[in-house]
Image: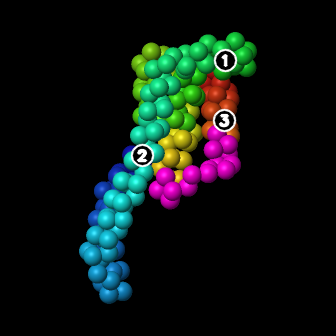
Amino acid sequence: MNDSFGQVVQEVSSWAIPVIFVLILGFGALRKVRVYEVFIEGAKEGFNVAVRIIPYLVAILVAIGIFRGSGAMDWIIAGLTPILRPLGVPPEILPMAIIKPLSGSGALGVMTEGLKTYGPDSLIGNTLSTMMGSTETTFYVLAVYFGSVAVHRTRHAVLACLLGDLAGLTMAVFICNLMFG
């Protein structure tokens, strides 16, 4: 049953992009839209957006590098460990909790290192994997989206996003302790 379902999903997946491509061309021909020219205009606009957000991306990447290189992350982990350990939060997952809102690639590196050290089927490995999927790279996303439309005052967006990350992290720890602990 699972093999046949997997084969159907695989077959649909391999045909999805060509079918969508043909549908777009057909719909454009039906509506008498010059699809290629519209695509080129969209690509030009996308390139302009990419150039406009480069300073914001450079700023966030430099901030992450300074944060990790200065040892501030190690200091924060050492300070939080005595508080979080009695709550059932393993200190080994704190680097992921700290780096994930800043950098997706940094978080992927932390998760890979944790999986190699503790194993993918361990409580820490499962918690790291769940945290990776249940949180967002908040500051990166804010830099890209707000930078693309030149928003300088984010108002309550940062706090709301960080509270969302905290909820995702908390539930990841709770569910993994419940399921695998």
Which residue is tagged 2? 55
Q: Is residue 127 above or below residue 80?
A: below
Residue at the (32%, 75%) spot, across then down: 38
Residue labelled with disc 1: 80
Q: Which residue lies under the disc numbered 3? A: 166
Task: Give the residue displayed 67% in from the left and 32% down from the top.
Answer: 170
Q: Nearer the viewer, residue 8 or 37?
A: 37
Residue 159 sits in which quadrant?
top right
Residue 121 vertical position relative to residue 78 in the rendered view, above or below:
below
Which mark is first along the chain, 1 or 2?
A: 2
Residue type indicated by callout 3: Leu
Query: What's the amino acid at mark 1?
Result: Leu
**181 with respect to 137 (left or right):** right
Q: Residue at x 43, y 35 (%)?
A: 61
Query: What is the x, y in percent for residue 24?
Result: 34, 74
Q: Nearer the viewer, mark 2 or mark 3?
A: 2
**Alpha-carbon span between mark 1 and mark 3:** 15 Å
Q: Earlier in the sequence, mark 1 or mark 3?
A: 1
Rendered location of residue 101, percent (x, y): 55, 36
Tag of residue 126: none
Residues shaded magenta: 147-162
In the image, is 134 to the left or to the right of 82?
Answer: left
